[in-house]
Amino acid sequence: MRKPERNNGRPVAIRGVLKRIERALVSNPVTEALLFNGVTGSIGRFLQAARYRREYARYRERYDIDPEFRFNGPGITMYGRGSIELGANSYIGRHSRIQAAEGRRVRIGDNTAVSHFVFCYTKNWVADQDMRGPDADGPGRPDAMALSTPKDALATKADDTSVGDNCWIGAFAFLTEGVSVGDNAVVGANAVVTDSLPPHCIAAGTPARVRKFKSYLGDDEKAELAAEHADVLGENLAERHGETVESA
């Protein structure tokens, strides 16, 4: 006999009853006014803020976070048995995430702005492998993928990740394991940082590439940085410094 369809462990019948109750509450102007108003909204926001304050206090106890470091918004997550060091006068925006795997370290320097929805990892799966697991034999059928394979059986890559002092990391940026961002660097929104970036640069894109060096640097300083970090220069910048890089 076929079992009744379920969603999140609840039979369809129960789900239907809950939906009817929800529709009845929302469609009734009295219950709608009672449940959805400025007062209840304020109470909800107050309770949510209190929950995050407790969570952020636990992060301060667990990791090395300067007293002047700021959590700017809800939903910020920090986890892992590694070390997380967050500098003075820096902040991280809402719904950002820092993962410090065991034995690994994340460092964010002083006076650095990490915007909203930024992810910073120290450990991740290796992309170039059979995601069905090490025992997979041949390409197989799509429905034969070993989704039940323990994920710790897959190959991973892990390394420290750091952001220097006086940096600005734009919203929705992703910093992969093992990268470093030099002092006074800017990483544009939606960038994916897969290689380390030099100081005093403005980088953007997927993968993130240096688009320019900051204008306060002299020509010789720019040329030296271009030569040292030729592998992460954007195409236009590489052409501009081509002769310098080749002669370095």
Image: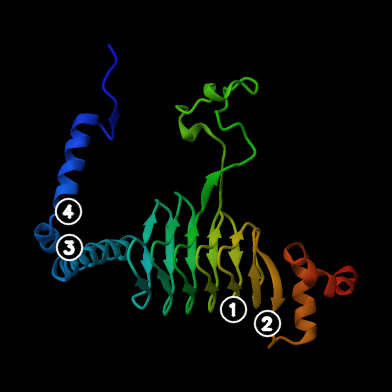
State yes or no: discs 1 and 2 in contact (Cβ < 8 Å): yes
Q: State which tag comes first along the sequence, 4 or 3.
A: 4
**Residue 244 position by quadrant:** bottom right
Q: Position of residue 8 (x, y in %)?
A: 28, 35
- Residue visible at 29% across and 25% down? 5
Q: Which residue is mark 4?
A: 27
Q: Is residue 85 or residue 232 the one in the foreground?
A: 232
Q: Quadrant of the N terminus?
A: top left
Compared with residue 24, is residue 56 higher up or lower down, i.e. above or below? below
- Residue 176 horizontal/vertical position (percent): 56, 55
Amino acid type for the residue under numbered disc 3: Phe
Would you place residue 224 above or below residue 116 in this image? below
Disc 4 or 2, which lies upstream in sequence? 4
How many marks can you see?
A: 4
Amino acid type of the residue tagged 4 in the rendering = Ser
Give the residue at x 51% y 63%: 172
Q: Which marked residue is nearer to the observer: mark 1 or mark 2?
A: 2
Any mark on residue 214, and which?
A: 2
What's under tag 1, amino acid-wise? Asn
Mark 1 or 4, closer to the camera: 4
Q: Which residue is mark 3?
A: 36
Q: Secondary structure at mark 4?
A: helix
Neighbour tally class for label 2: few under 14, some 14-19, many 20 plus, Cα within 10 Å = some
Left or right, residue 15 beside residue 216: left
Label 1: which residue?
Answer: 184
Q: Which comes sooner in the sequence, label 3 or label 1? A: 3
